[in-house]
Amino acid sequence: MEDSRVADKNTPYWWEEAPVKPLPRRPLAKKLDVAIIGAGYTGLSAGLVLAREGRSVAAFDAMNPGEGASTRNGGITSGSIRPDYATITRRFGEEKAIAIEAEGKIAREFLYDFIRTEGLDCDFQLVGQFKGVIGYDDYEKTARSAEVLTKRLGIEAYAVPYAEQRNFIGTDFYRGGMARMDIGGLHPAKFHAELLRVALASGLTVHAGTRVTAVKRDGSEFRVVTESGTVQARQVLVCTNGYTDGAVPFLRRRLVPVRSRIIVTEELAPEVMDRLMPKRMMMIEGRQLGFYYRPTPDGKRILLGGRDSSRFGDPAAPKLFLRRGLVNLFPELENVRLSHTWFGNVAMHRDMLPRIFEKDGVVYATGFCGSGVVWAPWIGTRAAHKLLGHGEQARTAFDFRPPAFIPLYRGNPWFMPAIIEGYRMQDRIALYRARR
């Protein structure tokens, strides 16, 4: 029997204030300058740039715009990159590693400036982020990382020793951590709704509930086949990320959709929030499958997310796993009910770096690996400038070869439960070694 404290609703908490909606049906244009597949953060950001440059451009979404990851994520503006600096250097060279590290700062600043200059009402707050570590050895490494961020990129970051930890988070689970002040939180569904508003006002056409079934080369142009008809387009931009399907088989063999699940508590008393999240910061962990969590924008609830190894339906086990994780962090929440739980797809691939690339004339902007709040608008904008031929404005360290294909994979991630369980085993071993 499912725990009665698990959740009342299996829909995103974010949809309470900013529900995803269908758009009025629009006739398909016979010809377009650019056809965009996907109307999430990436597709809308690209479409906004292209429309303001006078291009005829339409975005096609199989669902309601934003119904995928754009309104299902945690709303943390981390822009994190999963491989560390040493790994990127080993795989791609030091020049690429330096450029990628620096671009994270630029992409976050771009997002914050975009929200401000466009007047987007999305509850953005630049509150900083705390990263907790589980062992004292990890603390030393994290402290050095804070020094590097400050010296190399000018980011305000500093180590938080265990003795001062409760000034940042009301738990003894960690052995210290790091605070950095260039990261904040927003309401992801409001952000998408506002991005959609300004994109439509700029001349972008968005076709909701219009799945693209094929993209076919037609001389120097493309025929984009949809469930509602066929459109001729000079250029095509694919922005499907974790919701990539058979319409773009080249990308489907390279991206793995992984479920990310989130839970939200019922409203907590102000004094409880003051104890558990005194600075109302965004929170992450250093574990392989670490949780990310935060206060909701109104400061009344705690939202916690993590990877979900299930593949079908909406089973209870992943919800209970996240709930146990929440209680391990904050034992006083043992009897607190959850109000919402849901999941969405993030797109993982073999080298775990966001990407712009071109294949057979089609441009792809994709592969955000769980950090799309920052990377999707940035990469979408760079991809638009690439289509426009704007060399300097299109410049990005993430424009290079496609991700490697995954052997024996055709879109069904049958191997993910085993991989996630392997990561969990690594975390259990690391936790044991840190506490023995």
Image (tube, rainbow, N blue to C red):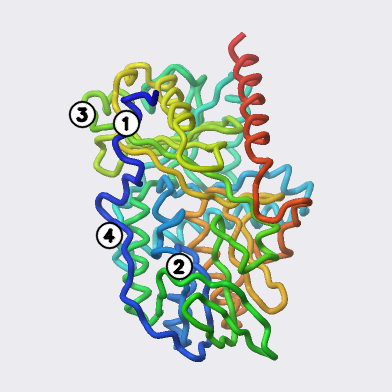
Determine which residue is flagged by label 3: 270
Q: Residue at x 63, y 51 (%)?
A: 256
Task: Report the residue marked by disc 1.
Answer: 338
Q: CA distance from mark 2 to mark 1?
A: 30 Å
Label located before the other in sequence (3 or 1):
3
Which element carries disc 4, helix, strand or loop?
loop
Q: Amino acid at mark 1?
A: Leu
Q: Amino acid at mark 2?
A: Ala
Counting residues from the N terminus, which is met first, the one under dot 2 or under dot 3? 2
Name the element at disc 3.
helix
Do the CB atoms of the residues marked 3 and 1 lie less than 8 Å apart? Answer: no
Q: Disc 2 on helix, strand or loop?
A: loop
> Which amino acid type corresponds to the residue marked 4 in the rendered image?
Asp
Depth order, front residue of 179/353: 353
Q: Pick whichever, 70 or 6, lies toward us.
A: 6
Which residue is labeled 4 in the image?
A: 121
Residue 165 to residue 435: above or below? below
